[in-house]
Image (cartoon, rainbow, N blue to C red):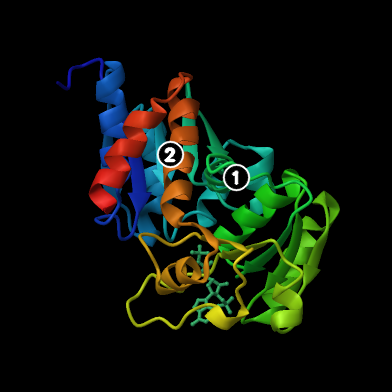
Amino acid sequence: MITGKTKIIGIFGDPVEHTLSPLIHNEAFQYLGLDYCYVPFHVKKEYLKDAVFAIKALNIKGVNITVPHKEVVIQYLDEVSEEAKYIGAVNTILNNEGTLKGFNTDSQGFVLSLKDEGILIKDKKFLVLGAGGAAKAVVYGVLKEGGEVYIYNRTLSKAWATKERFNNLGLIEVVNTIDKSVTERMQVIVNATSLGLKKDDPMPLSPELLLSEHIYCDIVYPETPLMKEAEKIGCKVIGGTGMLLWQAIAAFEIWTALQAPVEIMKKTLYKVLT
Ligand code: ATR
């Protein structure tokens, strides 16, 4: 029940109808008996500044930021965490008594989704496909955990810009073209492009370049065609649902300063996605 004391958490995006975040968070709030409520807000580009101001004006406790606002929003915040600054994108805001601080939990989401499957990142070679916002979160997470990054992108200049951005965090190299001599040297292959979101998208990589020893990760959910192919080949496959779940868990803990009910959030998410 919503009362005068209920703390409001929101999500700002355009579109926002598809988001599963209200479901996951409200279930978690209810399970822990917390007086919080998570609400979607359809915020168009031209209203983002006003919407961020409204977090303070309406005493909203926190928000998630999604497409297409993750980068633009930074300029309207009072503080930004080190990782969000590095990545250049914010997906979580905490209103700390009138001070708005931005975080990026996508990076942690990726790292934790691998840890949850028992995968150690340290010293592994990652081929990262893509150099957009999501790819940068993946690259940051891998480098911070001591993995090596080999980055490929359709627009090569963006891969080079990503290398420049993260060069001092660890080993990151640009890959000009992908063939078997490249994939053979890798332990983990990550689709961090948006390919697989739409039904008629081409695959981000030819399945022939995958080996059964590869760990194949996709940031897209639910199952993409390349995930299916990778499974057939015998790869260990990790889909984007894990990243979605673990970024939500990290955001929950930022807003509430409590341990998130991981199993409940997991169960809620997998129930709607299977
Ligand atoms: P997100 O925030 O989801 O990462 P983004 O910043 O728009 O979204 O990045 C999308 C990524 O998917 C980019 O790496 C993009 O490649 P370009 O930089 O060359 O645009 C990649 N991508 C999207 N459509 C693609 C396609 N048809 N073929 C190859 N790469 C594609």
Q: Looking at the rendering, in which quadrant would you find the N terminus?
A: top left
Specify whether tag 1 is near ligand 1 (CB below 8 Å). no
**x and y, in percent, of residue 193 in the image:** 53, 69
Q: Amino acid at mark 1?
A: Val
Residue at 37% of width from left, 30% of height from top? 263
- Taking depth in this image into account, of 83 and 122 the one nearest to the observer is 122
Per the rendering, the mark at residue 111 is: 1
Counting other residues with Cα less than 10 Å from the Cα at mark 2, is it few (<14), some (14-19), or many (20 or more)?
Answer: many
Residue denoted by label 2: 248
How far apart are the alpha carbons under marks 2 and 1?
13 Å
Residue at 27% of width from left, 56% of height from top? 18
Per the rendering, the mark at residue 261 is: none
Residue 256 located left or right of residue 184: left
Q: Amino acid at mark 2?
A: Ala
Residue 138 located left or right of residue 123: left
On screen, residue 43 above or below 172: above
| Secondary structure state at the residue bearing disc 1 | helix
On screen, residue 178 above or below 143: below
- Taking depth in this image into account, of 233 and 36 the one nearest to the observer is 233
Residue 27 located left or right of residue 156: left
Which numbered disc, 2 or 1, marks the residue closer to the eye?
1
Counting other residues with Cα less than 10 Å from the Cα at mark 1, is it few (<14), some (14-19), or many (20 or more)?
Answer: many
Q: Quadrant of residue 166?
A: bottom right
